[in-house]
Image (cartoon, rainbow, N blue to C red):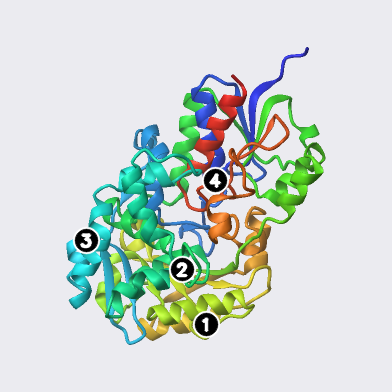
Amino acid sequence: MTAADYDVIVIGSGPNGLAAAIATARAGLRTLVVEAHATAGGGVRTSELTLPGFHHDVCSSVHPLGAGSPWFGELDLGAHGLSWIQPPAALAHVMGDGRVVTLERSVAETAAQLGADGPAYTALMEPFARRFAELARMFLGPLRVPAAPILAARFGLRALRSLRGLVKRFRGDLAPALLGGIAAHGMVPLDATATAALGLMLGLAGHAVGWPLARGGSRAITDALVAVLRSHGGSLELGTPVTSLRQLPTARAYVFDTSPRALLAIAGDRLPARYRARLERFRYGPGIFKMDWALSGPIPWRDPRAARAVTVHLSGDVGHIAAGERAVHAGSVGARPFTLVVQPTLFDATRAPPGKHIAWAYCHVPAGQRIDASALLEDHLEQFAPGFRDLVLARAARDPVDVEAYNPNYVGGDINGGLSDLRQLFFRPVAKRDPYRTPARDIFLCSSSTPPGGGVHGMCGYWAARSVLRALR
């Protein structure tokens, strides 16, 4: 038998692909990562999208699950140049009438803004915020016997509910809006079962580890992961689109940091018909419309508390958020959709020329459509930051079609790797004890289309690598 050229070849260099490659390289396996783009990173890249000297994150900018990732924490990415910047507040949420509520690192300081709902918020969040590291280890992965069953059960009773059901414990509108805006990151209607899970996990991450930026841009995360990979003997080949396994060197295992759709296109002939049919039924979520701006100054918020956080939600009360998400799933965009704004240069001046700023915003839109929501986003910002348009030096925009063209993993513009409703939250891409291993003994999937899903945390890659290592023993 001819020896394989490599033990493991990873197709795709997003954070999950690099995380998987690092795990196999650390175990002593000859590992190669193959990437179609000229730069590594998937959704974790930084580029001059508008003007020279203005460095924009192409997709993700703020990384609570990156800061809280058990696998990233084990890799000591700081020793390879990654530095987290923590804003004073994790998140600012702007209500329809202009009131601002902030997610503070302190549960008590957050609760103090909520009036009569402060005690209920503290009772909900404080016990879990203290044990966030344990929750992350248990829930950022596939379903398995929890290490702390009582903690897992207590959390599950709250998380496996709809967000609308969870917030019925509050009497006012601020706490439901704050948690509803966080839950809306999942792009699932807020009355759906288990939408509370993301609102709780990301909210707890804000208290436990913050919602930080990577200094210099999100590419710093990729650069650190690549450096770790190379320190363990792994290799990276850029500018090599893969359309068939036959074009790759031989390997004992091929690990796909791709969507199920791309896995089928590249290696579908190696998979049994029944499994192929199950992958073809995998459901993708809504898309995004994203705008990046080069600015002559910081966003002029009417309420300066919105400048205490990198991330700002312009979402109104929980009813407005829920209506916006329902509209997207019904195939339309509401007049005031869930809008996420990110203002990195308030806290990281390295991303723009002296005195200048960058910002970006997105809203959720129906998948795969040519949509121009530019005026919608800028009108929404202007409402709460009068004079914003006067600061704009240049713009760049992408609709769902552009988003998928840039990164085919974002099918229809879905940046979460697939719809994260109850059925696909835990069982993705199919219901299987080992969701990372396909019926082909040498083909594995490690993308955000596997548990625990979207986010820059590398845990999909970590668990996929565990599956590979078991198979290659």
Left or right, residue 330 beside residue 135: right
Q: Please give left or right for residue 392 compared with residue 241 in the image.
A: left
For the view shown, which residue lies furthest in the top direction?
1
Alpha-carbon span between mark 1 and mark 4: 30 Å
Would you say residue 377 is visible in this rendering? Answer: no
Marker disc for residue 376: 1
Mark 4 → mark 3, Cα distance in angstroms: 33 Å
In the picture of the structure, the residue carrying the numbered disc 3 is 107
Q: Secondary structure at mark 4?
A: loop
Few, some or many C-alpha atoms within 10 Å of disc 4 (few <14, some 14-19, many ≥20)? many
For the residues labelled 3 and 1, the Cα–Cα distance comes to 34 Å
- x 77%, y 35%: residue: 245
Which secondary structure lies at badge 1? helix
Q: For the residue carrying disc 2, how many other residues have a C-alpha within 10 Å: few (<14), some (14-19), or many (20+)?
A: many
Mark 3 belongs to which amino acid?
Val
Q: Amino acid at mark 1?
A: Leu
x then y, percent, for residue 343: 38, 65
**216 vs 21, nearest the viewer:** 21
Residue 172, given in percent of the width and then of the height, sits at: 27, 80
Residue located beneath label 4 in the image:
41
Sequence-first disc among 2 and 4: 4
Q: Which residue is mark 2?
A: 184
